[in-house]
Image (cartoon, helix red, strand yellow):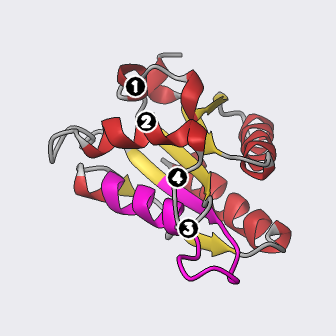
Amino acid sequence: MSSEEKLIVLYGTETGNSELLSMDICKGAEDLGMEAKAFGMEDIDSEDMLSYSRLVIVCSTWGDGEQPDNAMDLFDYTEGLGDSDLANMSFAVLALGDTAFDLFCEAGKEWDRVLEEKGATRIAERVDCDVDYEDDAEEWIEAVLETLQEL
């Protein structure tokens, strides 16, 4: 199977929650017969990301609305792409945050915005999860995997 047919799940995290959810997404995808691979955003070569046509981002917001440390370089790279560089990519974003902060889920919102601006096609609406994210995340994951299976 070529990389463009596989699902890539990229996570941006400081505490590990996004990583755990990414593993859940991969397991769910594999249970449905899809090939999926999760990477920390710091562990994938920026240009390799462009070879995938199916992308799921799971990203936590850190500090005052910032990207987690492991997501900053990849986000900057993606933001610098041309307006149609991601035209062959389908994507979905799951954002994690804390409503106690003014910029709730800002990092995920930024990913959602930049992927669309660079030409990627949204396959599911972004969901913004608070600290008790499990139920919302599970429902979103099921919907995204169902949509991916139909593609």
Separation of marks 1 and 2 at Cα, in angstroms = 6 Å
Residue holding disc 2: 74
Query: Which amino acid lies under the numbered mark 4 shown in the image of this protein?
Result: Gln
Separation of marks 3 and 1 at Cα, in angstroms = 25 Å
Q: Quadrant of residue 144?
A: bottom right
Give the foreground label among 1 and 4. Answer: 4
Q: What secondary structure is marked by label 1?
A: helix
Q: On the picture, is 150 further left or further right than 119?
A: right
Query: Which amino acid lies under the numbered mark 3 shown in the image of this protein?
Result: Asp
Q: Residues within 10 Å of mark 1 (few under 14, many from 20)?
A: some
Residue holding disc 1: 46
Separation of marks 1 and 4 at Cα, in angstroms = 16 Å
Q: Residue at the location (41% across, 43% down)?
A: 75
Q: Earlier in the sequence, mark 2 or mark 4?
A: 4
* Up/down of 17 relative to 39, above or below: below
Q: Which residue in the rendered view is the most extreme toward the left?
A: 83
Which residue occupies the foreground of this view, 63 or 128? Answer: 63
Residue holding disc 4: 67
